[in-house]
Image (spheres, rainbow, N blue to C red):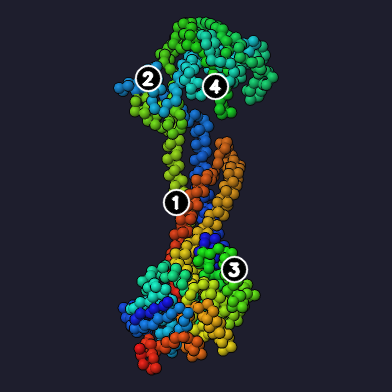
Amino acid sequence: MIKVNNISHTFYLGKKGKETAVSVLKDISFSVNEGEIITITGKSGSGKSTLLNLVGGFLRPTEGEIWIEEKNITTLSEGDLADFRLENLSFIFQSFQLIPSMTAYENVELPLVLKGLDRDIRRKRVMTALERVGLQDHASYYPSELSGGQQQRISIARALVMESKIILADEPTGSLDSETEQEILAFIKELNEKENLTFLIITHDEEVAKIGHQRIHLHDGEIMKEGVSV
Amino acid sequence: MKLQDQWQFIRSNMKKSKSRVYMTVLASAMACTFLVVLASVGFGIHDTLIKDVIENRNVTQIEIYGLDKDGESKEIGDEEIKQIENMEGVKAVTRSKELAQTPVYRTDNYAGHGWTVVSHFPSEIEAGMEVEEGRLPENANEIIVGHHFSNELIPQDKDVNEIFDANGELLEEFAYKDSLLGKEISLTVSKETNGKEEEHTLNVTIVGITAPPARGWMEDRTVHISEELLAEIEDFTGTVKGAVHESEDHYVSSGYDRIHAYAHNMEGVVDISEQLNEEGYYAYSPAEELKNINVVFTIVKAGLIFIGTIAIIIASIGIYNTMTMAVTERTPDIGIMKALGAHPKKIKQIFLLESSYIGLLGVLIGIVASYIISFIANIGLTMIVEGMFEEQLPEGFRFSSIPLSLVAITVIICLTVTVISGSKPAKKATQVDVLQALRREI
């Protein structure tokens, strides 16, 4: 489902003409099968967020290829990448990334609006998604009126409403207390088991990493296995 | 993303910065009003002048004065008239000879003078002359008279001071009220030989009365007589066209006094005039005058619209500013939308629609305000000019006129300028970096 082939990524930082090359990822390869949860761990600065951004199409690798659903996304134009994301990928962010001026309902509805679906279809799908995260009664609330856990549930509902098979999650429980964290993790597991959804989760939390069928640990931009880079 | 959803999105975003949007719309509306009102002065005066030209003359009519043949002036005869009739676009060529004196017409106890002509009826009918009552003359002593000919007739058995009012108008009670159709009237012509005046009276029958002229204020008191009757008058006076004095003979031509060519429409007049001039005819038409007026006023109007456009360009800076601020404020939202899969084109479209919406609101308000100002100006300024300068403006004079073409020009200019001013911020929106917008750590 996802194939990452020998990708490397280098950032050029500093003033133009005096840039310093910082290699963030080096020759990373892995693949994720349908219905699998893969967790990517590593310390801050290890390159795990960059890896998620590359898979999500927010960045282009300096070298290597990323194949998702038989499509090499590294060769797609910005417009095609946007269309690809809309059809195939869903995101859960650490800081939820909900639009504050929109209600919970409108936030969940946004991807469907972007897809150009009819209002009636949107209503049905949004209410189903909100029911699944248990927040159907909070549809008219604004993000600022919801707790952190509830906001993350709205963020998950927004990911679910897209009905894509792959969900990329960046520290999904990073902003939550331990009780809410357990709740969210249980929900992710449930979605994986019942609906065969594929998750790629970035985390620095070992508890979260444990839910992965496949675990990748990054250290200085390289995949480590039992202390040895692979 | 559907257009309806885009509108919804734009409207909810605009609500967030109401006062800023209101001020921008106000600036656009003021600029549009300035453009429309400024240009409307050009349109108003142009309309008034055209109305003046058209109201006083028939715009499809070309007056032909004479012919220049090899540098010498030549009289226009039937051969030349046939040539003009065969020209492309010519509907009819009317020609008439005027009696060189004003005869006296008498019937019952009434008498009056009448401008007497010999007309070529087939061409007159072709050109639009209508006989309202009766028919065209068939015999030598049959005539037709203009619709207002009866106004010429005044009672002969009354004192002149009695029958006219202070303005010199004939009092209604003394006006000739009977029908003239079928009436036999006398036509008296005179001649003067060696200081001795002689009169000769002919009896004629009125067989037709023409329809009133198209314009209400015009009066037709013409008397149309036959060629034979003219010949009889010439026999009596011994002069060309019945001139009273022999000495006048040198000044009176035996040819046609009035020759008018008629085009099928106003557009054809200029072509026919050019053709006539090429052939050496002296021709004049109001359409040519209109053409010159139109050229001058097109330049004036273009200049006024240009000045007004500068105001819209200045207002567009406000739109640019508003849109740039909107993009900056909504950068996180744009980032989220792009992360979810919003196509850059759609994001650009949303911001372009927003700037167009502001422009459209401005132009709509501006046009409504312009119509109100124009209405007030046409009433108020006329009163001011007449009151302060004691000048009587021509009837129907308009300072300001807003035709639909001006509205269309304004809408096009305003929307073009606002789309251009919104395009840079819209492009900036498409270039928002998703990761920076989401404030991610890289």
Residue type indicated by callout 4: Glu
User: Mark 4 belongs to which subunit?
Assistant: B
**Element type at marker 3?**
helix
Question: In front: mark 4 or mark 1?
Answer: 4
Residue type indicated by callout 2: Glu
Question: Could you classify mark 1 by the number of other residues whose Cα lies within 10 Å: few (under 14), some (14-19), or many (20 or more)?
Answer: some
Question: Could you classify mark 2 by the number of other residues whose Cα lies within 10 Å: few (under 14), some (14-19), or many (20 or more)?
Answer: few
Between the residue at mark 4 and the residue at mark 3, the CA separation in whole angstroms equals 76 Å
Give residue A124's mark. Answer: 3
Residue type indicated by callout 1: Phe
User: Mark 2 belongs to which subunit?
Assistant: B
**Element type at marker 1?**
helix
In the rendered view of the protein, which quadrant contains the C terminus of chain B?
A: bottom left
Answer above or below: position of A223 versus A112.
Answer: below
Q: Are marks 2 and 1 in contact (CB under 8 Å)?
A: no
Residue that badge 1 annotates: B306
Residue A118 placement (x, y as % from top left): 55, 63
Q: Residue furthest bottom?
A: A227
Residue type indicated by callout 3: Lys
Discs 4 and 1 share one subunit: yes
Between the residue at mark 2 and the residue at mark 1, the CA separation in whole angstroms equals 49 Å
Q: Are marks 3 and 2 in contact (CB under 8 Å)?
A: no
Between the residue at mark 2 and the residue at mark 4, the CA separation in whole angstroms equals 26 Å
Residue that badge 2 annotates: B80
Between the residue at mark 1 and the residue at mark 3, the CA separation in whole angstroms equals 54 Å
**Element type at marker 4?**
loop
Answer above or below: position of A105 versus B441.
Answer: above
Give residue B130's mark. Answer: 4
Q: Residue furthest left?
A: B70
